[in-house]
Amino acid sequence: MPSSVSSPARTIRIGSRKSQLALVQTHWVQGQLQQYFPDRSFEVHTMSTQGDKILDVALAKIGDKGLFTKELEVGMLQNEIDFAVHSLKDLPTNLPPGLILGCVTERVNPADALVVHAQHCDRQLDTLPAGAVVGTSSLRRLAQLRHHYPHLTFKDIRGNLNTRLQKLDSGEYDALILAVAGLERLGMGDRIHQVISAEVSLHAVGQGALGIECRDGDPEVLELLQALSHQPSTYRCHAERAFLRTLEGGCQVPIGVDTAIAGDQLTLIGMVASLDGQRLIQDRVVGAVTEAEQLGVTLAQQLRQQGAQEILDEIFTEMRPEN
Ligand code: DPM
């Protein structure tokens, strides 16, 4: 072929879960890339993950790493898709060999929200009646809210956002805790009754950002993805992920974070809590944004020295499948 005739650019295949939230996020990524690269074509391939199929078991019990990502990762490694769009908080901190975190998109509000049944429309977390049933399957939310609001009762809940809201509205729960980001992306921001402050509950690592995973050694895709990369969000999320990676042991854990950037300084706050909410260890580090990962490691070591490892070991024992 004469060198002046270039071969047509390949179609880029984007992998996504099938849930409504996943599709909203993936179509946003597709739309952005299409705007940046109008001459290229991008198509979406959907896949079900283990986490989409097992809906009746508490998330923390099956909290295997990669519950919502594994099938997509296999798809990338088998060259069926070129990259996968995830809620960054669902993406394990250690990726399979051959795959990398290609970019982190601009983070939206990472906070959690209280959503209430209509009968509690004039109440907040601190004024819900004693024994009110709050739905969450996040150990992080459970531990921190128990710590601050011991008068509340917590009950596991699974399923997509619509299913959860139906269970709330039918009276099975008095309130739910959900991510602001998910509610807003699905156009259900009007259900947010109270945005929970960082003083009460630190958010999950990566919450509110999208993480795009791709093959290591696919420079073409990696370069396309740089158009969607947001540098401050990337620094923050890399610090948070390094913190979690250094602490975690294999299942979902009550670990929360908060990050902020001022000039070239990054502040990372992190906490580990016991499931009953009685023990809660929190500390912070400040340093250069370019040292984001090291800050996460340092904070994890600080919390360990203050007893975080004992708390986590207890939880890993409790959460073993045979229990
Ligand atoms: C992870 C957790 C939850 C999701 C645990 C946690 C919430 C589970 C629950 C790792 N993934 O947050 O401590 O409360 O039952 C998930 C949501 C989003 C991504 C929904 C939500 C949307 C927000 C985002 C589920 N994953 O947290 O309400 O993109 O950050």
Image (tube, rainbow, N blue to C red):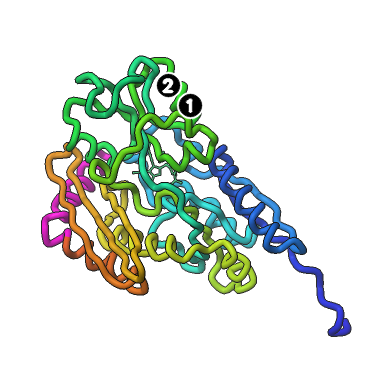
Q: Quadrant of the N terminus?
A: bottom right
> Residue 266 vs residue 9: left or right?
left
As drawn, the residue found furthest toward the bottom would be 3
The relative height of residue 21 versus residue 157 in the rendered view (above or below) is below
> Would residue 123 be seen by someone viewing this image from the given angle?
yes
> Residue 88 vs residue 17: left or right?
left
Q: Are marks 1 and 2 in contact (CB under 8 Å)?
A: yes
**Residue for point 45% across, 25% down:** 165
Report the amino acid beneath label 2: Lys
> Would residue 160 be seen by someone viewing this image from the given angle?
no
**Magenta residue check for 310:** yes
State ligand 1's quadrant.
top left
SS assignment for the magenta stretch, majority: helix
**Residue for point 19% across, 31% down:** 149
- Residue 163 has which mark? 1
Whole-Å distance between the Cαs marked 1 and 2? 6 Å
**Residue for point 30% across, 58% down:** 244
Which stretch appears magenta? Answer: 303-323
Residue corresponding to mark 2: 167
Report the amino acid beneath label 1: Thr
